[in-house]
Amino acid sequence: MADFIMPSLGADMTAGLLVAWRVEEGDHVENGDIIAEVETEKGVFEVEVYASGLVEKLLLQPGSDKVPVGTVLATINTGSAETTARPLETDTRLRVSPIARKMAAEKNIDLSLVKGTGPQGAICLADVEAGSGRGPKEKVSSSPIELKKTTDFQAGMRQAIAAAMSLSNREIPHYYLATDIDMSNALNWLKEQNRNRSIKQRLLPVVLSLKAVAKTLTKIPELNAIWVDGQLQLQKEIHIGVAIALRGGGLITPAIHHVDQLDLDQLMAALSDLINRTRTGKLRGSEMTDAGITVTNLGDLGVQTVYGVIYPPQVALIGLGKISERPWAENGMLGVRQVLTATLAADHRAGDGLLGAQFLDALNKCLQEPENL
Amino acid sequence: MTETEIRETIIRGLSLIAPEADFEELLPTENIREELDIDSFDFLNFLIGLNENLGVDIPEDDYEKLVSLDDLIKYLSTRIH
């Protein structure tokens, strides 16, 4: 038997609204199937189920009230089959974030009774806050807790972003490194590539940068990780979150999966598709939770250097500024090159400056050989 | 195609990318990308739309020539067959 719970679609999410079911009681579901649509301050998302079996009972009907993250929404009868939930560590120690542990202690909550919804079942602050009203044997009541409704979508999104960025600043000791990358080789190569491509297939420079980040992470995997319960957990796959601005305000950072395995055309198509679906509100839950690192590209504006805030529980953020003509000194001579300033904001608990410097150095080298991306 | 028709096609394409914009307010000499807050992805999609509607393939080297509405109209009217 497995529970389908209101998922956490980001560090800032505390509650969600069940908008629609995509299954009925009695339907068979497979691990990864879309089971429901959930609305948060960031929009509406298709949410996957991580169990296989028959949908036994839908406990909540789509309604106008939000429910806390962790609320059981449906039960899945997995029968004799093992629940193919997301792989959990064999370590049976309770995974709890430091701030959740602190709040639990303050409110006298037994952590073993709290359902964890963070990465790999970790208990995060939202779980403890949700669990603070419950007794030991009590299932979540059928009448959801009334939460403040934000009728203004933009205000709601700003609240969510504010919460996440405050959390990040409070908990993560950031350090920052920057490097200037000569993009002449890369841009010349790209120009040649695009000359032979129809307008629909042209590649944008950001695609080169994303692929280069993925390639660099295969060499320096410590930055493709999440920080949970005082431990660094390296991610096995390379899913990169991309910061996408919404018209009228707001920011979402959905992930492109397996960036290292995509060629440049596939990556351009994936990025284009992601941007379109973000702006039309058709993102999936897994895109909100799977990123091991995020890249923010402010290159279209005049920003040269980006000093960003890491999105927890990730441990790094890559900032890409505007590629612009700058004076460049090399071999005792002065010239003009197309330069990109790339920054790394990294979690000092997860690594030190040397690691970050190695990463930026490797990223630079990658971008000098665009034909190998 | 008349200049008016070209202008209409352009505005239609831009409204897909910037639905909330007031195109009455957009001056023909203003920098479109800045005024409408259009990034490189949006711009590429817009050009793809023009390609589909007007049959004009715009090479990358020409992107920087297309700053304002006037620039676009002038550029396209010489290239539409």
Image: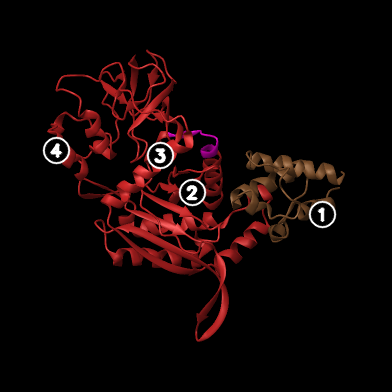
Chain colours: A red, B brown
Mark 2 or 1, closer to the camera: 1
Q: Amino acid at mark 4?
A: Glu
Question: Residue A360, can we see it?
Answer: yes
Kind of residue sitting beneath label 1: Lys
Which amino acid type corresponds to the residue marked 3 in the rendered image?
Met
Crowding at mark 3 (Cα within 10 Å: few <14, some 14-19, many 20+): many
Q: Decide if residue A196 is on the left or right side of residue A160.
A: right
Q: Is residue A144 above or below residue A191?
A: above
Please state which of the two labelled residues, at mark 3 or mark 4, is closer to the viewer: 4
Residue at the spot of label 2: A262
Front residue of B66 and A220: B66
**Residue corresponding to mark 1:** B74
Kind of element beneath mark 3:
helix
Image coordinates of residue A92 in percent, x first then y, are 15, 37
Q: Position of residue A98 (x, y in %)?
A: 19, 45
Q: Give the spatial CA distance, label 3 vs label 1.
A: 44 Å
User: Left of A32 or right of it: where is A86?
Assistant: left
Residue tagged by mark 3?
A288
Snapshot quadrant of residue A257: top left
CB of mark 2 within 8 Å of CB of mark 1? Answer: no
* Residue tagged 4: A106
Chain to which the residue tagged by mark 3 belongs: A
Span shown in magenta: A277-284
